[in-house]
Image (cartoon, grey):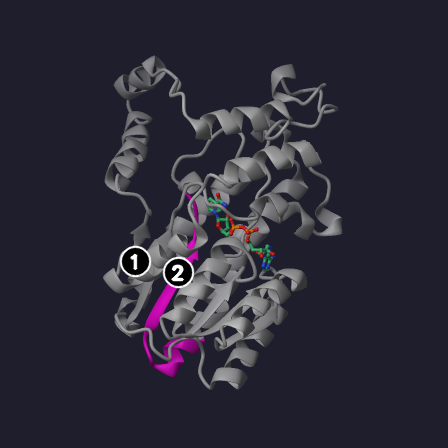
Amino acid sequence: MKDFKDKVAFITGGGSGAGFGQAQIFSEAGCKVVIADVRQDNLDRAMEHFKRENADVHPIRLDVTDRAAYIAAADETERVYGTPPQILIQTAGVNAFGPAEASTYEDYDWIVGVNLGGVINGMVTFVPRMIRAGLGGHIVAVASLGGLGPCSTTAPYSCAKAAVINLMETYYEALKPYGIGVTCFCPGNMNTNIHEASLTRPENLRNSGYYESPEALEGYRKHNARGMDIRDVGRAILESIRQGIVISIPYENREDILRGEMRRMIDYCTPEGMARLKEQKPPTEDNEELRSLMEAAQLGWSKAKGDIDWVETDRRYTK
Ligand code: NAI
């Protein structure tokens, strides 16, 4: 897709962070934009901005895990703008981090439910409508570098994002005949409000194995504040659509990043490779980003709750 004028763009998680940045950039490129978000306060704040800009943006309150609500949101989009979207950007996501061995059923149900289940719901709701409309288009899902390179404290998040990458590649092949492109966006750190994710955690899925105090989350917020600007995120996605990029990693050294991840996978499958991996030293790079992560960890971020007694003491938050 090269021309964005008058296209209808439906953006999940559009009320905050990366989704809000995308809504700004696609609106400025001439799109009519639907922002769909589970948080009404985020939608209201975003709409204050778009009203000031006189932009054609329509808010819809939507929990992406609710299939009936998703169908209703698709119907509403067609009522408001006359067609299904030609651009679907699935950005809504949540995270919570802690040792894999501390994870509860509820950690998996919530994090996988939103990050993977939400994208599946978006595909099943919109793909048939977009094909039937016959207008072509482009579908984006926001995964993460964490879906390519998992770490021991990101199990539910990384497995969901890895599955999203695989899912989007599948749809890339499937949707070619219909003139619908597919991009999976895999960023690292972004300057957003994801440290507030647990505010959207449903009551019945509250039981977590991870330690999440306000101080620990404040440490994580400071780390995120060093991340990519949300308007740059929007620009990177628009450019990826324009160029028809399937796996979009918004950094100059993206090929090296991917080679590193693939190298590890290749090493896993031979005895020589396993020996190479064992010799590898952990990164000792002294940079601000690593320091802010260490500071957050000292406040308990990404540790297990103290009462989870099977987790090693230094992986639990015990003051
Ligand atoms: P954010 O918290 O600022 O924005 C996420 C938005 O999604 C919020 O407005 C939230 O209300 C909404 N949301 C959460 N659950 C929802 C649900 N069930 N249904 C509908 N909306 C829901 O966070 P951010 O960082 O902008 O997140 C966007 C995406 O970027 C997520 O998929 C996240 O996993 C991904 N990501 C974020 C990174 C970061 O460093 N912030 C790094 C890599 C990926």
Q: Which residue is mark 2?
A: 140
Residue 307 locus on image (x, y percent): 75, 24
Q: Quadrant of residue 282?
A: top left
**Residue at (45%, 65%) from the top-left corner?**
24
Q: Which residue is mark 1?
A: 240
Disc 2 and disc 1 in contact, CB within 8 angstroms: yes
**Quadrant where the C terminus lies?**
top right
Q: Is residue 130 magenta?
A: yes
Q: Secondary structure at mark 2?
A: strand
Q: Secondary structure at mark 1?
A: helix
Residue 213 locus on image (x, y percent): 70, 34
Vertical side of 301 occupied by 163: above or below: below
Q: Amino acid at mark 1?
A: Ser
Q: Is residue 266 magenta?
A: no
The residues tagged by marks 2 and 1 sit, at their Cα atoms, a distance apart of 9 Å
Vertical side of 181 occupied by 233: above or below: above
**Residue at (31%, 51%) from the top-left corner?**
247
Residue 300 locus on image (x, y percent): 64, 26
Q: Quadrant of residue 83?
A: bottom left
Q: Is residue 82 left or right of residue 101?
A: left
Q: Is residue 104 left or right of residue 290?
A: right
